[in-house]
Amino acid sequence: MISATSVVQSLLSGMAEGVNYSLYCLGLAFVFGIVRIINLAHGEFLVLGGYIAYWLLVKWGVNPLLALPLAAAMAGVAAFVSYRVFLQRIRTSSELNTLILTFGLGIFLANLYLQLWTADIRNIGVDWMEQPLSFFGIYVSVGEILTILISLAVVFGLYFFLTRSRTGMAIRVTAIDRDAAALAGINVERVDLVAFTIGGLLAGVGGPLLGMLAHISPGAGLHITVKAFILTVLAGVGSIPGLLVAGMILGVGEALTVTFINASYRELFGFALFIAILVIRPSGLFGRRL
Amino acid sequence: MKSRTNGEGLRDKVAGANPAPVTIAPMTQPATGATLLEARDLSKHFGGLRAVASISFRVRQGEIVGVIGPNGAGKTTLFALLSGFLPATSGEVLFEDAPILGLRPDTLCHLGMARTFQVVRPFPEMTVFENVKAAAVFGKQGRRSNQEILSDVEEVLRATGLAPLAGQHPPSLSLPQRKRLEVARALATRPKLLLLDEVLAGLNPKEIQEALPFIRSLNEKHRVTILMIEHNLRAIMGVCQRILVLNFGQLIFDGAPSDAVEDARVIEAYLGGQQHA
């Protein structure tokens, strides 16, 4: 029987999951919105961050939370190198080229991970973070609370970076109108590189969190990329606060699907939502007109 | 084909288009400053089309030079070449005696060259103030304190008459106001040379009357050299000290506006040639 508690429980877990979804897709949404590259290797950058945390944990016993900066940095380096070596050369031609190139990059990285870390599914949870806390019959783990806080901090951090800093302003202005930004004295090619690297950093932060809350495997990246793409479209390209809302909608929707229908329909919810949004509101919930 | 009586010439077209005569202010003495911009044999081919065909000219410091020509004459292509938005097929462009072809638009901006777009392109999500600020932050002056930037922005807003509209968003502005914003943004980068691409297009005669003194003030008060494309002949006669006339990608006239209306080739380009009448 479905009780009120179980509804509240699934709503809350859905929201918690949703906030993390927002973080997982932040990098892809950011790069798509600013540089107009759909980075299909986004999930692989995220998984890289997860494996960095995994290595630190199994080799030196470092808590995955402390591994966050290094995980982010490594994924950022991977993004930087990918952009400088490959994407920069084909950037100006057509959008489809970057799509194909990043897809290939993703396949390469996934297979590299397979060589380095085997096909085993890894969880990097730490015991004390999996302790459940109970509030009025609703269960939350310490890890969930921490990851929500981290996700929120990163989303708002990015928001403030974009609205307050000089580089953030250059990025925003370039996203609105490249040519006009260049006329105002902004090196738009540098902005592309910086934005793509930031996209990598953001993905890298998500990796350890994914490893703690669920698990990582060499092939997990594509799944994340697809989810991130759904959320980006749902939020509307270029809307960062919209991502939080979109993440929550997806998270809660999935949780309710599991509670009321069947766990096997969980993934279906996201794709159904995706199609519905494309039909009803192609610019997304918070997107500007394109 | 157009049929014209002999008495109807370009001068009539210039003077007779509107009953309210534009008062042509006495020209400031012809500029004799150093060469600021020079094009040498500049060409741009699109396949078999020679959009710009070995054009050479100079713009001296302090001048207001107009570029006119019929539709498709190559005016906007010329601007795109000068401002780094299109690569040239051949030729050279010098800005303050240094070659600038192939430089990125942002580098040109830092050297002191600014342009506006024919179709205004403000940042719609940002207020008028923020639009101008973006240009002031990343313009020629480099990194500065917030205080300096703010006072700079305020000065530009005052000079362009946009100060009362600082908090508005561009979509709520009228067309003349948006055109001013476009100029304000270019001005906020502190250019030595300003390329204006049809800033008067779409304005009514009254608005043009108000815009002309504004363009002159940019030149006189702010010491900005101006190269402007203009469709409106009367306006360009009223404000430019010298004009370049393009036709089919070629420069067919370079001289005083008053001489242009007497020039046979210019008349032919504009009126389709009296001999065919």
Image: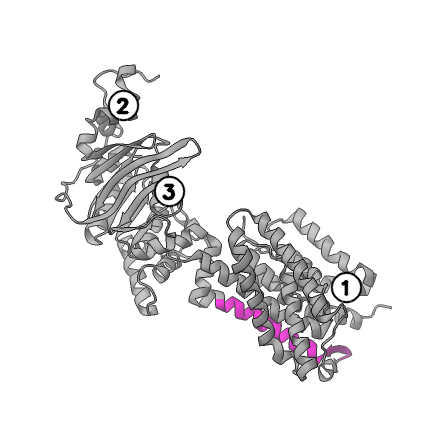
The image shows residue A146, relative to residue B3, as above or below, that is below
Dot 2, crowdedness within 10 Å: few (<14), some or many (≥20)? some
The location of residue A41, given as percent across then percent down, is 63, 59
Q: Which residue appears at 54% of the width and 61% of the height? A: A196
Query: Residue at coordinates 31% horizontally, 36% vertically from top-left?
Result: B54
Q: What residue is rendered at 36% in x and 31% in y?
A: B71
Residue on which disc 1 sits: A256
Left or right: A162 in relation to A50: left
Magenta extent: A136-161
Q: Which residue is under mark 3?
A: B88
Labels 2 and 3 touching (C-beta < 8 A): no
Q: Position of residue A223 (x, y in %)?
A: 71, 61
On the image, numbered disc 2 is attached to which residue? B268
Which secondary structure lies at badge 1?
helix
Label 2 amino acid? Answer: Glu
Residues at discs 1 and 2 both on one chain: no
In the figure, residue A8 lies in which quadrant? bottom right
CA–CA distance in space, label 3 to label 1: 60 Å
Kind of residue indicated by mark 3: Ala
| Marks 1 and 2 close (CB-CB < 8 Å) | no
> Is label 2 or label 3 in front?
3
Outermost residue on the right side: it is A1
How packed mark 3 is, by other alpha carbons closer than 10 Å (few <14, some 14-19, many 20 or more), is: many
Q: Are marks 3 and 1 on the same chain?
A: no
Of residues B138 and B175, which is closer to you in this image?
B138
Residue A37 higher or lower than A247, as above or below: above
Q: Is residue A7 above or below residue B190?
A: below
Residue B254: x and y in percent read: 22, 35
Spatial CA span between label 1 and label 2: 76 Å
Asked if residue B217 is positioned above or below residue B51 in the image, the reply reads below
Query: Distance from label 2 to label 3 (Cα)?
Result: 28 Å
